[in-house]
Amino acid sequence: MKEKILANKHVAKYRKNTFIRSISVSIAATFADYVLSLLLYHVINVSEVYSTVLGSVNGAFVSFYLNRWWAFKSGSGKLRGQAVRYILTLGFSILLNSLGVYLFAKFTVLPFVIMRILVTGLVGVFINYPLYKNFVFKVGN
């Protein structure tokens, strides 16, 4: 059944699309981040801050490796250069996410969770994806 679904021409088209694969990686990385954060906090009794930091680092590693090997298929590229460019992009993304939430909080009355989702989506689609594709992993270059 799985093979039949994966062989479908519409599904196959999206499986080849770096944008769809990168979004899928973002979802998986977010899941890895939250699972570890919640496990550390609720099961192992690590503080909220340390749980968040460790979860975020875990999500960043998952994102880097899945994007490198699967979403952008650039595993043959130089790991060190990709890692440095990824860290720069990650720092820029954190800055933009923080600034975006700050601006939404200052100028709107939206709930925090809505602000986070909107800002994360905008930064992910318009900043992270193009930087991953054209700077970090250099697809098609």
Image (cartoon, rainbow, N blue to C red):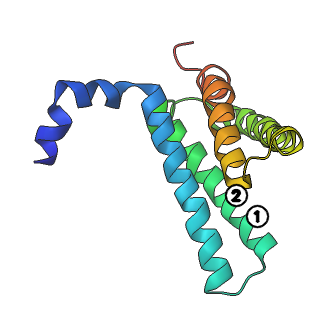
Query: Which residue type carries mark 1?
Result: Val
Rendering coords of residue 90 (x, y %) = 74, 40
Rendering coords of residue 78 (x, y %) = 62, 31
Rendering coords of residue 51 (x, y %) = 72, 72
Rendering coords of residue 135 (x, y %) = 68, 22
**Snapshot quadrant of residue 121:** top right
Q: Which residue reaches farthest front?
A: 109
**Relative to 84, is 68 on the left or the right?**
left
Q: Which residue reaches farthest right?
A: 106
Query: Which residue type carries mark 2?
Result: Val
SS type, badge 2 = helix
Residue 115 visible: yes
Q: Which residue reaches farthest top?
A: 141
The C terminus, quarter of image: top right
Contact between labelled residues 1 and 2, with CB atoms less than 8 Å apart? yes
Q: Name the residue under label 2.
A: 57
Say which of 65 and 1 sits in front. 1
Q: Residue at x 57, y 29 (%)?
A: 77
Q: Residue at x 60, y 29 (%)?
A: 125
Compared to residue 17, the image places residue 49 above or below, namely below
Residue 73 visible: no
Q: Mark 1 points at which residue?
A: 53
Neighbour tally class for label 1: few under 14, some 14-19, many 20 plus, Cα within 10 Å: few
Compared to residue 62, the image places residue 95 above or below, namely above
SS type, badge 1 = helix
C-alpha span from label 2 to label 1: 6 Å
